[in-house]
Every structure is written in C-alpha cells, then in structure tokens.
Amino acid sequence: MTRERARLLGVSKRWLLVLLFVAAIVTAWTTGLYEYLTVESVRRLVLDAGWLGPPIFVALFLLQGMALCPAFPFLLAAGFIWPPWEAFALNMAGSLVSCLVGFFYARTLGRDLVAARLPARMRRFEARIVERALPTVILMRTMF
C-alpha cells in the first residue's frame, strides 16, 4: 500500500503495522495455530521441506520474534535437526533477523511513546548517541 493510499484511508503507516501485527496474533490464537509450535512440529516441518528447511527455519524464527514468543523451542529444535555448527549458524541467523525486526518495531512504533517519557538525563545521552554513535557505543561496550 502506498503512502498516498494510506493517507486517503486516514491510516498512518505505523498504525497499519500495528493492525497487521494484532491481526496475525488474533489469527494464530483463534485458529489454534499457536498450539502447534513445539520442538517436534518445527523439526518435522523443516525436515520435510528438504533444502528449503534452513530458510523456513530462519523465517519461523523471525515470526517468533514478531510474536514476542520465547526462542527456546527454535534453539532446541535446531540442535535436534542439524549438526552442532549448522544449528549454531542457523540459530545465530534467526536471532539476528529477529532482533532486527524487534529493533525496527522499537524505532518506528514505540519511539514516540518512549521519547515523550524520557527523563532529561536520558535525552542528553540519546543526543550524544545520535551525534557520535560509534565512539559512544564502543565506550559503553568497554564499560560493561
């Protein structure tokens, strides 16, 4: 949907994403789809997919992150499906994609909500990160 169409409908892009996310959760809940998310079901799905198994696994990991569900079933399933190094690589890829989606949600949907409630001290810190991101992050990483 283009921005012009969204504007014509009176819906912002953020609200459209929120509605899409809520619709996905409601669909999973009402159809009972969430009950089938077990280690064995993920294992069966990925093994039956053949060479498409790893991309499907990473896509499922992504959906898990969007639904704010625990990642443990995916981490465990990968260990039962693939050899250790392959499972590690797929879990890292899935975790990275899931984190990127979470970061995208936080930056687009939650930013205004949180920014309005930040204390002055945190706003100064955020301004420092915006101005000099790399040195600030390196300093934070070495401190903690």
Image (cartoon, grey):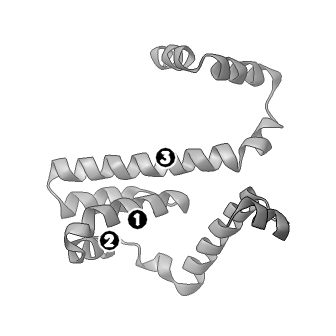
Q: Which mark is residue 99?
A: 3
Q: Nearer the viewer, residue 101 or 77?
A: 101
Query: Which residue matches tag 1?
Result: 60
Q: Nearer the viewer, residue 51 or 27?
A: 51
N-terminal label among 3 and 1? 1
Identified by mark 3, the residue type is Cys
Give yes or no for contact between labels 3 and 2 (Cβ–Cβ under 8 Å).
no
Estimate the x, y position of residue 143 in percent, counting from the top left.
Answer: 50, 14
Identified by mark 2, the residue type is Val
Q: Which mark is residue 27?
A: none
In the rendered image, which quarter is residue 72 located in? bottom left
SS at circle 3: helix
| Residue at x 76%, y 40% (from the top left corner) | 114
Most distant residue in the left direction: 83
Estimate the x, y position of residue 62 in percent, counting from the top left.
Answer: 45, 58
- Distance Cα–Cα, label 3 vs label 2: 20 Å
- Distance Cα–Cα, label 3 vs label 1: 13 Å
Q: Is 18 on the left-hand or right-hand side of 70?
A: right
Q: Which mark is residue 42?
A: 2
SS at circle 2: helix
Placement of 43 over or under 95, stated as above or below: below
Q: Is 60 on the left-hand or right-hand side of 128?
A: left
Q: Can you see residue 111?
A: yes
Identified by mark 1, the residue type is Leu
N-terminal label among 2 and 1? 2
| Residue at x 46%, y 78% (from the top left corner) | 35
Quadrant containing the N terminus is: bottom right
N-terminal label among 3 and 2? 2
| Residue at x 75%, y 18% (from the top left corner) | 124
